[in-house]
Amino acid sequence: MDIYFAGSIRGGRSDVDLYARIIDLLNGHGEVLTEHVGQQDLETQEAALSDREIHDQDLAWLRRADAVVAEVTVPSLGVGYELGRAVAWEKPALCLYRPGGERDLSAMVRGSDELTVAEYDDPASLDAIVTSFLEECR
């Protein structure tokens, strides 16, 4: 199974360590096409690419993916864009959200019948959430 992981990059990197943890979890279920999202030095790596190259590369991976998993606690225009494309391309998509922070989840995400939203407080609970979602995608 090819899995597209989405998390905030230019919108804020405060959850990068969590992204790496989720990517490790996802690797147990298939190939994560976007492992770079969980790397500390991502901005340095992407500096060699134009915005167009990043856009086109990410959309190629998204089109290839069998499922999408997005951590949406840190708001990101790019993640919202990717989720919109995933819905348009009828890709199953799981949005992971930690409530209680300084920002509420967008109604455009929470209100969509085409997106699965799972709230969690403890990252230890992610294994069961992700496993259940990906098993439904098979």
Image: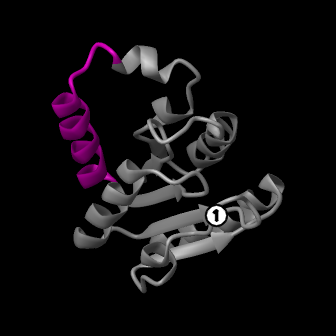
Up-down relation of residue 107 to residue 81 (above or below): below
The x and y percentages for residue 2 are 40, 50
Query: Which quadrant of the structure image shows residue 99?
Result: bottom right
What type is the residue that disc 1 sits on?
A: Tyr
Which residue is depicted at the point 73% across and 65% down?
128
Q: Position of residue 6 (x, y in %)?
A: 46, 48
Residue 86's quadrant in the figure?
A: bottom left
> How is the structure coloured here?
one colour
User: Residue at 31% across / 57% down in the picture?
Assistant: 81
Magenta-colored span: 47-65
Tell me where residue 97 appears, x and y as whole percent. 64, 63
- Say which element carries label 1: strand
Question: Can you give x and y, in whole percent of width and height, for residue 65 in the image?
Answer: 33, 53
Q: Is the residue 117 above or below the residue 39 in the image?
A: below
Q: Which residue reaches farthest front?
A: 102
Determine which residue is flagged by label 1: 97
Magenta span contains residue 49: yes
Taking 32 as reference, is 135 left or right?
right
Query: Residue at 29% of width from left, 44% of height from top?
Result: 61
Q: Residues within 10 Å of mark 1 (few under 14, many from 20)?
A: many
Q: Is residue 66 visible?
A: no
**Residue 37 within the magenta-colored segment of the rendering:** no
Let me know if residue 95 appears in the view. yes
Closest to the observer, 13 or 30: 13
Q: Main secondary structure of the magenta part?
A: helix
Q: Is residue 51 above or below residue 69?
A: above
Q: Residue at x 41, y 61 (%)?
A: 67
